[in-house]
Image (cartoon, helix red, strand yellow):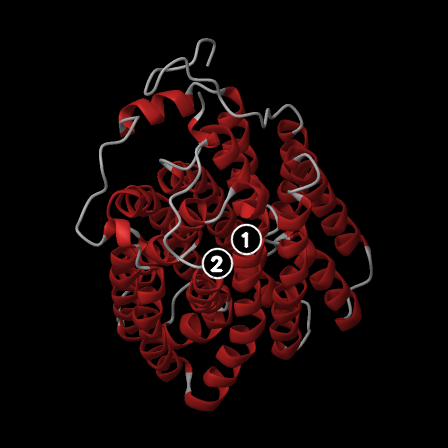
Amino acid sequence: MSSSTLSPAKTLSMLQLLACGAAIVTLSMGIRHGFGLWLQPITQAQGWTRETFAFALAVQNLAWGVFGIFAGMAADRFGAFRVVVVGAMLYALGLVGMALSPTGLLFTLTAGVLIGAAQAGTTYAVIYGVIGRNISADKRSWAMGVAAAAGSFGQFLMVPVEGFLISGLGWKEALLALSAAVLLMVPLALGLREKSFAGGPTARREQTIAQALREAFKYPSFQLLMAGYFVCGFQVVFIGVHMPSYLKDKGLSPQVASYALALIGLFNVFGTYAAGALGQRIAKRKILTTIYLSRSIVIAVFLAAPLSPASVYIFASLMGLLWLSTIPPTNAVVAQIFGIQHLSMLGGFVFFSHQIGSFMGVWLGGYLYDRTGSYDIVWYIAIALGVFAALVNLPVREAPIYRASPGKLPQGA
């Protein structure tokens, strides 16, 4: 019997869970999507290269992936409430450090390691674990789409706010203001407090962590999902961090970049929601293949077309539909195959692959720009990787994994 057929032990109402979870993701993802707006102000004020800033954000994405694994384990064992509270505290400290760091090394430790760890405890792997435990399988993909759409709305809402704060307060004061805002996640986390975790760890599980990991990593579809998610991270973080500077280098105003990032966030609200809803009706591997292939086409047309504010806004709108829309079907497939028992942890491992891609995308953008004076090579890599991801998602098997007995590995896994 597959554990994915077991009913989740519901302790939270859907409205409470989605409202609080969505608000937390809105703050966490909304703030981090605007970090590209600080690239030029910080590097110019500190006399740093773009690679210094890009490396710190690359470390942030890698740290997010590494800590995401352990945040997922902790959330599966102790519940999301405690993990989100710790994450919010680290986020506030990281933003303060980002504002006050006098050296590139300290900037990397705060903007990179601290904020990366904070994002691990306040975003999808942790929130999706709560969704998996409290929302039945027939609505799970849709609910994950709602949570992902909240992160997109956060980008639409927060990126213009961050641009306004930078212009109105200065880049350093803007970061300090955001450090206070992230603490709102602490009271919101109360809405994710599950009764089954109130007294500490949950009851004995059918699978140990080691058994769950052996099962997943031997399963080809899990490997393919991780490969596709690597590409997702590479593309979106490269674009999110470096597009403002790319557009400014081409002679467009900073407002064009701010509006473009906001449009990505706005249209991603619709894209992620649609991906989650369609995941209840269409094979999720087909949704993922379509998303990755469409990204490559949109990027190629954007680079080939004459650059103007209008072309940027069209690109941002189309890319927004595809931006985080991979998240609901990818996580829903993991839940569908392996069940909900270790969902946050397994989601954390898949997301770690995403963050390795994010590291490569943001770091290569800065590295190759400093050496060639152009982002062209990284754009071409992003196109090729999109085609690769489309192909590797096609053979993914979505059926629940068969387990002959609890905790035992399936034959042929």
**Residue at figure coordinates x 32%, y 70% from the top left:** 95
| Image point (76%, 45%), residue name | 297
Name the amino acid type tagged 2. Met
Percent across and percent down for residue 187 are 31, 72
User: The disc labelled 1 sits on which kind of residue?
Assistant: Ala
Of residue 169 and residue 47, the one placed in the foreground of this image is: 169
Q: Nearer the viewer, mark 1 or mark 2?
A: 2
In the drawing, does residue 253 fall left or right of residue 45?
Answer: right
Q: Please identify the quadrant where the N terminus is shown.
A: top left
Q: Is residue 105 visible?
A: no
Determine whether, in the image, residue 137 is placed left or right of residue 277. left
Q: Nearer the viewer, residue 344 or 178?
A: 344
Q: Looking at the rendered structure, which numbered label has been put on residue 14?
A: 2
Residue most toward the right?
A: 305
Give the SS element for disc 1: helix
Q: Position of residue 258 (x, y in %)?
A: 60, 74
Q: Residue at x 24, y 48 (%)?
A: 78
Q: In the rendered image, which residue does mark 1 sit on? A: 143
Q: Residues within 10 Å of mark 1 (few under 14, many from 20)?
A: many
- Mark on residue 94? none
- Label 1–label 2 contact, CB within 8 A: yes
Q: CA distance from mark 1 to mark 2?
A: 9 Å
Q: Position of residue 222 (x, y in %)?
A: 49, 27
